[in-house]
Image (tube, grey):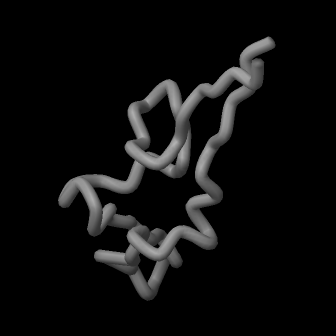
Amino acid sequence: MEDIYEQNWEECEYCEQSYYEHDTGYPEYECGLCEGECLGGDIDSGCPLSFKYQIE
């Protein structure tokens, strides 16, 4: 049986807020690990800290 581990972006040490609009409250986040946009821990988007595993 294959399980999926998806990183919780709110607790991720690499996810950092890079932009914030004070009038609308809109934030943007960057990943310090892959030096790009934070993917929110989504494995389908390619988060490097999310993975599939199988226990045998």
Task: Locate residue 16: give its quadrant.
Answer: bottom left
Name the outermost residue toward the front: 56
Name the outermost residue toward the left: 35
Q: Position of residue 13 (x, y in %)?
A: 47, 75
Q: Using the image, determine if residue 7 lies above or below residue 48.
A: below
Q: Which residue is located at x 38 percent, y 66 percent?
A: 29
Q: Position of residue 52 (x, y in %)?
A: 60, 26
Q: Position of residue 11 (x, y in %)?
A: 62, 72
Task: Pick whichever, 20 or 15, lies toward us.
Answer: 15
Task: Locate residue 30: give its quadrant.
Answer: bottom left
Q: Using the image, determine if residue 3 lies above or below residue 26.
A: above
Name the outermost residue toward the right: 1
Q: Which residue is located at x 29 percent, y 53 percent?
A: 37
Q: Which residue is located at x 42 percent, y 42 percent?
A: 47
Name the outermost residue toward the bottom: 22
Q: Using the image, determine if residue 2 lies above or below residue 16.
A: above
Quadrant of the frame with the N terminus = top right
Quadrant of the frame with the C terminus = top right
Q: Which residue is located at x 39 percent, y 79 percent?
A: 21
